[in-house]
Image (cartoon, grey):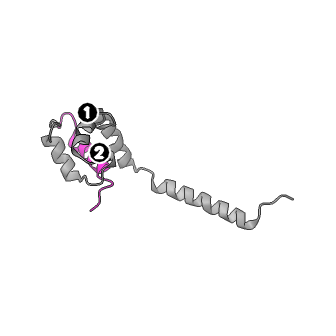
């Protein structure tokens, strides 16, 4: 009979369990998913890779800081003020364009990596 040794089966099961646990821990919550989709829809035209806002930020910040989704220093309060008031070349965004509820989801999504 061709059976896999017990140690090998345990290692395989452990590896599969680890992969499942890691994929679960990196899965987006429904709020993060909604924030990501809103960010792509409302902000992506300027702040996605290759966007005008991304290009302007690349001139001002160190490499890796131009893509807002990759930054770890954005707080919800900063994002909300920047959006509602405008900052640098970015115009202010009205509540008619992005509601307060939508902005809160976008802010939470972008600040998910923020370090205290």
Q: Mark 2 points at which residue?
A: 68
- Above-or-below relation of 48 to 13: above
Instruction: Please report the residue visible at 71 percent of the width from the left and 63 percent of the height from the top.
Output: 8
- Above-or-below relation of 46 to 67: above
Q: Between residues 23 and 64, which one lies in front from this camera angle? A: 64
**Among the 4 quarters of the image, the one containing residue 101:** top left
Q: Residue 21 carries which label?
A: none
Instruction: Please report the residue visible at 31 percent of the width from the left and 43 percent of the height from the top.
Output: 67
Categorize mark 2 by other alpha carbons within 10 Å: few (<14), some (14-19), many (20+). some
The percent coordinates of residue 109 (x first, y second) are: 32, 48
The percent coordinates of residue 64 (x first, y second) are: 32, 47
Q: Between residues 58 and 22, which one lies in front from this camera angle? A: 58
Q: Between residues 33 and 12, which one lies in front from this camera angle? A: 12
Q: In this view, does 23 lie to the left or right of 80?
A: right
Q: What stretch is highlighted in magenta?
A: 95-116
**Among the 4 quarters of the image, the one containing residue 6:** bottom right
Quadrant containing the C terminus is bottom left
The percent coordinates of residue 78 (x first, y second) are: 19, 50
Of discs 1 and 2, which sits in the foreground?
1
Quadrant containing the N terminus is bottom right
Instruction: Please report the residue visible at 26 percent of the width from the left and 41 percent of the height from the top.
Output: 58
The percent coordinates of residue 94 (x first, y second) are: 16, 36
Query: N-terminal of the two: label 1 or label 2?
Result: 1
Q: Is residue 58 left or right of residue 29?
A: left
Q: Mark 1 points at which residue?
A: 52
| 100 magenta-colored | yes
């Amino acid at each position: 009979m061709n059976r896999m040794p017990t140690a090998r089966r345990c290692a395989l099961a452990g590896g599969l369990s680890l992969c499942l646990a890691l994929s679960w821990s990196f899965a987006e919550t429904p709020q993060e998913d909604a924030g990501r989709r809103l960010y792509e829809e409302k902000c992506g035209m300027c702040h996605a890779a290759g966007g005008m806002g991304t290009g302007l930020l690349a001139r001002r910040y160190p490499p890796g800081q131009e893509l807002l989704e990759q930054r770890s220093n954005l707080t919800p309060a900063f994002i909300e003020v920047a959006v509602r008031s405008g900052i640098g070349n970015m115009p202010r965004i009205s509540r008619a364009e992005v509601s307060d509820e939508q902005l809160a989801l976008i802010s939470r999504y972008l600040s998910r990596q923020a370090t205290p």
